């Protein structure tokens, strides 16, 4: 598999302040040896799993925060003062590196070639003030890149020719979906201001349309199927879209969902909080779903009910139709449920 581990950062209360534990789960256990053994009803019921011991723990800076991002098979951690650490998965060791130029408590990251790009996504902060930074792996140095451009959409109706909904009007430049196209362009869709593309070779942003990517959050390219996979913007079902372009991208272009696979509805009392997709190679995917589970019903406003955090990891395989129709089928292998207790972040 291309990714030997699924990385989860879990916050745990230890003593007087939280500790951030990096757990690494081998996704090979989510798949049956043969596809014929998968797809049964038992595969839809998550088995209970035990989180493996933490590979490494980070002490929460107080006061302050820590932010984590994936760099291929490694993990980078930064704090509120810009101090930066990298967990080297091959050496199973932590080393210090040059500080990040602009610390960001909330961000999205993209690995393109031998460079890591990090885009800030702090709520309520002007998009022009959101930092966009690059880490060059050849010398492990950070540098600033051109920020995502913005214009006043309210004063230029030709720029955004239709009315905004309530959420879009509140923060039209909030990030809604993102992906990497052709191993050289970073596409970012906003809630109400269209989609932008960053050319990593030229170092420039351009607006490529008033449309938005049909995903919610990150979409991943799966080369074995020639499609981008993610979770649909409307209902967060696993879906596939073709973003390949034979000609220039049109401002009014709409990318339809080519395939949609509905998942099982969560049990009563489970609230979906996030979804994450990790390509594993050979058409295999790890689907991560994060839930908040509430147990018991409060009998009055003074009664407290118990709530905890759950992670469900599922192994799925996308195969071509054996009949040669060109359609794709999904094979559901195994799913495992983990009680994590504290807050969790997938990488």
Image (cartoon, rainbow, N blue to C red):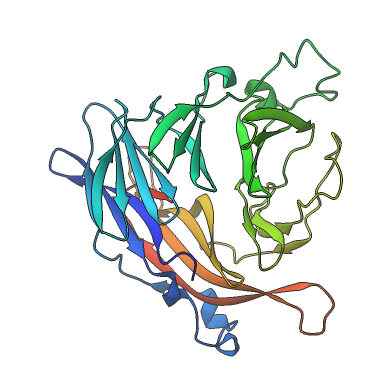
Q: Residue at x 38, y 27 (%)?
A: 103
Q: Is residue 295 visible?
A: no
Residue 293 percent across, percent down from the top left: 42, 54
Pick out the residue farthest to the top.
155
Q: Is residue 216 left or right of residue 320?
A: left
Pick out the residue farthest to the left.
15
Pick out the residue farthest to the front.
138
Q: Residue at x 75, y 63 (%)?
A: 259
Viewer-proximal residue among 259 and 296: 259
Residue 43 percent across, percent down from the top left: 53, 78
Residue 247 percent across, percent down from the top left: 87, 45
Q: Is residue 275 above or below residue 85?
A: below
Q: Is residue 282 above or below residue 5?
A: below
Q: Is residue 239 left or right of residue 287?
A: right
Q: Is residue 9 left or right of residue 263?
A: left
Q: Is residue 326 visible?
A: yes
Viewer-proximal residue among 319 and 233: 319
Viewer-proximal residue among 72 and 301: 72
Q: Is residue 268 left or right of residue 345?
A: right
Residue 117 percent across, percent down from the top left: 51, 38
Q: Is residue 302 above or below residue 305?
A: above
Q: Is residue 244 above or below residue 142?
A: below
All told, the count of numbered labels is 0
Quarter of image, res 202 = top right
Q: Residue at x 33, y 43 (%)?
A: 303
Quarter of image, res 78 = top left
């Amino acid at each position: 598999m291309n990714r030997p581990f699924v990385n989860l950062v879990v916050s745990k209360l230890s003593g007087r302040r939280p500790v951030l534990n990096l757990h690494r789960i081998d996704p090979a256990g989510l798949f049956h040896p043969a596809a014929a053994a998968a797809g049964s009803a038992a595969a839809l019921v998550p088995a209970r799993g035990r989180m493996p011991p933490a590979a490494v723990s980070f002490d929460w800076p107080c006061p302050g925060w820590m932010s984590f991002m994936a760099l291929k098979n490694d993990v980078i951690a930064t704090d509120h003062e810009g101090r930066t650490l990298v967990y080297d998965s091959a050496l199973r060791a932590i080393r210090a590196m040059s500080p990040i130029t602009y610390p960001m408590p909330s961000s999205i990251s993209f690995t393109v070639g031998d460079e890591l790009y990090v885009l800030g996504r702090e709520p309520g902060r002007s998009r022009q003030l959101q930092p966009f930074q690059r880490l060059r792996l050849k010398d492990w140095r950070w540098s600033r890149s051109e920020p995502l451009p913005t214009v006043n959409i309210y004063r230029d109706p030709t720029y955004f020719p239709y009315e905004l909904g309530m959420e879009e009007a509140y923060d039209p430049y909030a990030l809604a979906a993102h992906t990497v196209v052709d191993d050289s362009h970073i596409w970012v869709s906003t809630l109400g201001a269209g989609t932008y593309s960053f050319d990593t070779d030229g170092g420039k942003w351009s607006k490529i349309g008033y449309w938005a990517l049909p995903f919610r959050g990150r979409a991943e390219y799966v080369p074995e199927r020639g499609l981008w996979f993610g979770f649909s913007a409307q209902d967060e079902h696993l879906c596939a879209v073709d973003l390949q372009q034979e000609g220039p991208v049109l401002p009014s272009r709409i990318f339809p969902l080519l395939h949609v696979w509905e998942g099982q509805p969560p049990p009563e009392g489970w609230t979906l909080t996030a979804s994450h997709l990790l390509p594993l190679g050979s058409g295999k995917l790890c689907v991560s779903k994060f839930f908040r589970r509430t147990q018991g019903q409060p009998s009055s406003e003074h009664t407290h009910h118990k709530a905890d955090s759950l992670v469900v990891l599922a192994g799925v395989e996308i195969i071509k139709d054996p009949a040669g129709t060109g359609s794709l089928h999904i094979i559901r292998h195994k799913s495992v449920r983990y009680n994590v207790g504290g807050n969790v972040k997938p990488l």
